[in-house]
Amino acid sequence: MREAAVCNRYRPLLRHFAILLPCYIALLIHAPLIHAEQQPEYRLKVAFLYNFIAYTEWPGQQSVNLNFCIYGDDPFGEHLQHLRGKKTNEQEIVIRHTKTIEDLATCQIVFISHSMVDNLNAILNQLNDKPILTVSDSPNASLQGVAINMSIKEGKVTFEANIASAKRNGLKLSSQLLRFASEVFQ
């Protein structure tokens, strides 16, 4: 009799567990699939980043390295390894991660991640008039002053270019690059 009382007492909990268990299993099965879908996007975005770097002219390029800094969380993961050590215009690309705005002054390229986009105005004010190429993949970032903003449209990586921001920082974006932009802001 005592066993029946214990069973009746836990029956709602067992029903709840029986309903939630398949949901947890479904989440575990689909989580890697969602992650796998994001990987090709960022693999392609790394290839775009290389072209943005290769088709940008910095004033008085004197240094041996081009510091590519990721400000905030890194969405690229292992795909950034494809950039590490590559050269463009005889300069080697060096990857750095930073979470402090003061460190950005030592960068030639700054990718502003989604985790930092809420501070976009402060970031751009810090980088104004410095020869730093700003890149993001956040909605409307080009309109706010980021030089190049990537997005996904119809399953393809596209980008917008803000020429005025690039010029203000002393950078020249190649016309060969700009002809592939989905939109160019003057």
Image: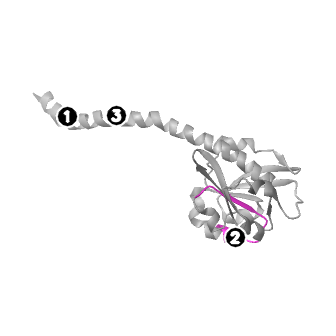
- In the picture, measured across the screen, residue 1 lies left or right of residue 73, that is left
Q: CA distance from mark 1 to mark 3?
A: 15 Å
- The residue at 86%/64% (across/down) is 59
Q: Nearer the viewer, residue 18 or 35?
A: 35
Q: Which mark is residue 21?
A: 3
Q: Which mark lies nearer to you, 1 or 3?
A: 3
- In the picture, measured across the screen, residue 61 lies left or right of residue 1, that is right
Position of 164 relative to 151 (above/below): below
- In the picture, measured across the screen, residue 150 lies left or right of residue 93, that is left
Q: Which residue is mark 2?
A: 126
Residue 81, image x, y percentages: 72, 42
Residue span colored magenta: 123-138
Q: Earlier in the sequence, mark 3 or mark 2?
A: 3
Tag 3, which secondary structure?
helix
Residue 186, image x, y percentages: 71, 68
Position of 49 relative to 11 (above/below): below
Is disc 2 surrounded by few (<14), some (14 to 19) or many (20+) residues within 10 Å?
A: some
Position of 171 relative to 31 (above/below): below
Quadrant hosting residue 161 = bottom right
Q: Amino acid at mark 2?
A: Gln
Q: Earlier in the sequence, mark 1 or mark 3?
A: 1
Q: Which residue is mark 1?
A: 11
- The residue at 77%/44% (across/down) is 84
Q: CA distance from mark 3 to mark 2?
A: 49 Å
Residue 100, image x, y percentages: 66, 62
Quadrant hosting residue 140 = bottom right
Is disc 1 surrounded by few (<14), some (14 to 19) or many (20+) residues within 10 Å?
A: few
